Image (cartoon, helix red, strand yellow):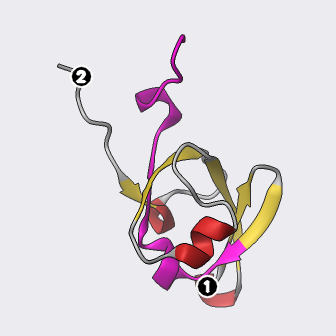
Amino acid sequence: MPRKPKLTALPELPEGQSALIARVDEGLVEVMEIGFVAGVRVTPTHSGVGGDPRVYELDGTLVAVRRAAARHIYVTSPEENPKEGD
């Protein structure tokens, strides 16, 4: 039986470290509409003063998301979630 990948809330992802979006809580239509959907690679690049909002690279585009919304986006390491055929 395959083990479940470890999920991390997006704000906990260190700057510069890429991960794959594993899950977005229901009700976050706004972030899903701008591309935060399962399977997409995301990388935190930098933060505003005080750490909020944080800027993420998502499919080559920089997007700023407030911590309150990012807490409901969960990521997993690409190594724990390999693509089929790898």
Residue at 80% in and 64% down: 62
Which residue reaches farthest bottom? 50
Separation of residues labelled 2 and 1 (CA atoms): 36 Å
Say which quarter of the image contains residue 33: bottom right
Residue labelled with disc 2: 2
In the image, the segment drawn in magenta is 64-86
Q: Nearer the viewer, residue 39 or 79?
A: 39
Residue at 62% in and 58% down: 15
Residue labelled with disc 1: 52
Q: Is residue 38 left or right of residue 47?
A: left
Q: Residue 82, how many percent across, how many down?
A: 49, 24
**Which amino acid type corresponds to the residue marked 2 in the rendered image?**
Pro
**Which amino acid type corresponds to the residue marked 1 in the rendered image?**
Asp
Q: Quadrant of the N terminus?
A: top left
Q: Residue 46, how many percent across, how many down?
A: 72, 68
* Residue 32, placed above or below residue 64: above
Say which quarter of the image contains residue 35: bottom right
Q: Residues within 10 Å of mark 2 (few under 14, many from 20)?
A: few
